[in-house]
Image (cartoon, rainbow, N blue to C red):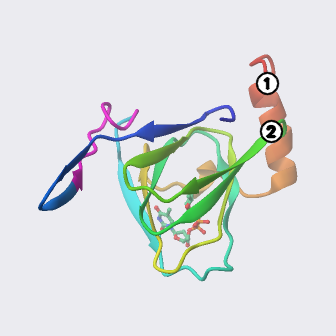
Amino acid sequence: MIINTRVIEFSCHSDEYGSLVALESNRDIPFSTKRVYYIYEVDELMRRGFHSHNDLEQVMICVHGSVKILLKTPFEEEVITLNDPTQGLYVGPMVWREMFDWQQDAVLLVLASEYYDENDYIRNYEEYEIMARKHFRGSGV
Ligand code: T46
């Protein structure tokens, strides 16, 4: 996986009554969760995201359906398919993301380490690239 990203496998309690996944801050989720949001009713051809965050950490979970996430830095990129509610995609600071190929009825649940702050967003790719090169300098990528 590319720098500052990883897939987290959650424990699932399944029995004849159905399935349950519990997410605890600083245990299953590698930070204290301050905000939860979910994205749904997205047209299949819609692409969202197109930004990075300066400091924010997030875990994305596709709790229903399927969606693809493009993760990108100036040095590498990867596409992850989220289609399993027992898997979370951790995305740390300074990783560009785009969400696409939304299966009808997909629901993307996101846990975030901070309250909403538009100042933490880097929405211009050229600006992001300059900042990311500085940020990752010396990190071996
Ligand atoms: C991310 C990806 C995965 C709020 O008012 N509060 C919030 O917590 C969020 C996340 C958004 N908003 C407002 C801001 C915009 O007016 O909701 C609107 C849509 O947000 P945005 O265009 O940023 O949505 P996406 O899908 O491009 O990005 C979102 C998150 O913003 C972002 O942090 O990593 O999902």
Q: Is residue 20 above or below residue 113?
A: below
For the residue pair 115 and 104, the one nearer the viewer reads as 104
Q: Is residue 72 visible?
A: no
Residue 8: x percent and y percent? Answer: 45, 38
- Left or right, residue 56 beside residue 25: right
Look at the image and tell me in which quarter the C terminus lies: top right
Residue 141 is labelled as 1
Give the residue type that dot 2 points to: Glu
Q: Magenta region, mostly helix, strand or loop?
A: loop
User: Is disc 2's CB within 8 Å of ligand 1?
Assistant: no
Circles 2 and 1 in contact, beta carbons < 8 Å: yes
Label 1 neighbourhood size at 10 Å, few (<14), some (14-19), many (20+)?
few
Question: Circle 2 sits on which residue?
Answer: 76
Looking at the image, in which quadrant does ligand 1 appear? Answer: bottom right
Residue 99: x percent and y percent? Answer: 63, 63
Residue 85 is labelled as none
Badge 2 or badge 1: first in the primary sequence: 2
Element carrying mark 2:
loop
Residue 96: x percent and y percent? Answer: 71, 49
User: Which residue lies at the image location 41% right of the left edge and 62% below the top edge?
Assistant: 37
Q: Give the range drawn in magenta.
A: 20-30
What is the CA distance from the residue labelled 2 to the residue labelled 1?
A: 8 Å
Image quarter of residue 103? bottom right
- Left or right, residue 10 beside residue 2: left
- Left or right, residue 78 beside residue 126: left
Q: In this view, does 67 lie above or below 42?
A: above
Look at the image and tell me in which quarter the N terminus lies: top right
- Left or right, residue 52 beside residue 92: right
Q: Residue 109 in magenta?
A: no
For the residue pair 130 and 108, the one nearer the viewer reads as 108
Q: Residue 22 in magenta?
A: yes
